[in-house]
């Protein structure tokens, strides 16, 4: 799911409710912004951690996941990927004859 939100004067953004629910982010939870080249990734740390990292059962906790993200970023940086402006554009690209 893609989502767009506006940054406020104070640099705050609202995480859409559907994404908060999927990521189990609740009011007061900690989140971390990770930088991958020109991309930012929001990483939920949750209320059930000490703030030093994700819970052990989180996909963010695995080296495999981090390697997959880095591979994707490297491919985008090399011009091998495509960034779609809308969900509709992406879905249309899947329609093949």
Image: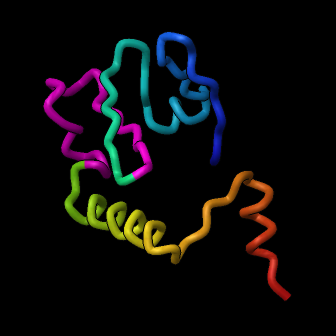
- Compared with 68, 41 (above or below) is above
Give the image location of residue 89, x and y in percent: 78, 61
Quarter the C terminus occupies: bottom right
Q: Residue at x 27, y 59 (%)?
A: 66
> Which segment did they paint magenta?
38-60
Give the image location of residue 68, x and y in percent: 34, 66
Count of numbered circles on the image: 0
* Residue nearer the viewer, 18 or 7: 7
- Compared with 70, 45 (above or below) is above
Q: Residue at x 35, y 52 (%)?
A: 36
21 relative to 73 in the view: left or right: right
Q: Is residue 47 magenta?
A: yes
Q: Residue at x 35, y 38 (%)?
A: 43
Give the image location of residue 54, x and y in percent: 23, 38
95 relative to 6 in the view: left or right: right
Give the image location of residue 56, x and y in percent: 19, 44
Q: Is residue 66 magenta?
A: no
* Residue nearer the viewer, 60 or 76: 76
Which residue appears farthest toward the right when viewing the image? 97
1 relative to 34 in the view: left or right: right
Q: Residue at x 76, y 64 (%)?
A: 91
Examine the image and state in which quarter residue 47 appears: top left
Colour theme: rainbow
- Compared with 67, 13 (above or below) is above
- Compared with 8, 15 (above or below) is below
* Residue nearer the viewer, 70 or 27: 70
């Amino acid at each position: 799911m893609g989502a767009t939100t506006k940054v406020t004067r104070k640099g705050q953004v609202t995480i859409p409710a559907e994404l908060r629910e999927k990521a189990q982010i609740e009011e007061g939870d900690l989140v971390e912004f990770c930088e991958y080249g020109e991309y930012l990734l929001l990483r939920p740390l949750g209320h059930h951690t000490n703030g030093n990292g994700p819970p052990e059962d989180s996909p963010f906790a695995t080296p495999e996941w981090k390697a997959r993200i880095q591979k994707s970023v490297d491919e985008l940086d090399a011009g091998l990927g495509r960034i779609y402006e809308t969900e509709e554009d992406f879905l249309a690209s899947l329609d093949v004859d």
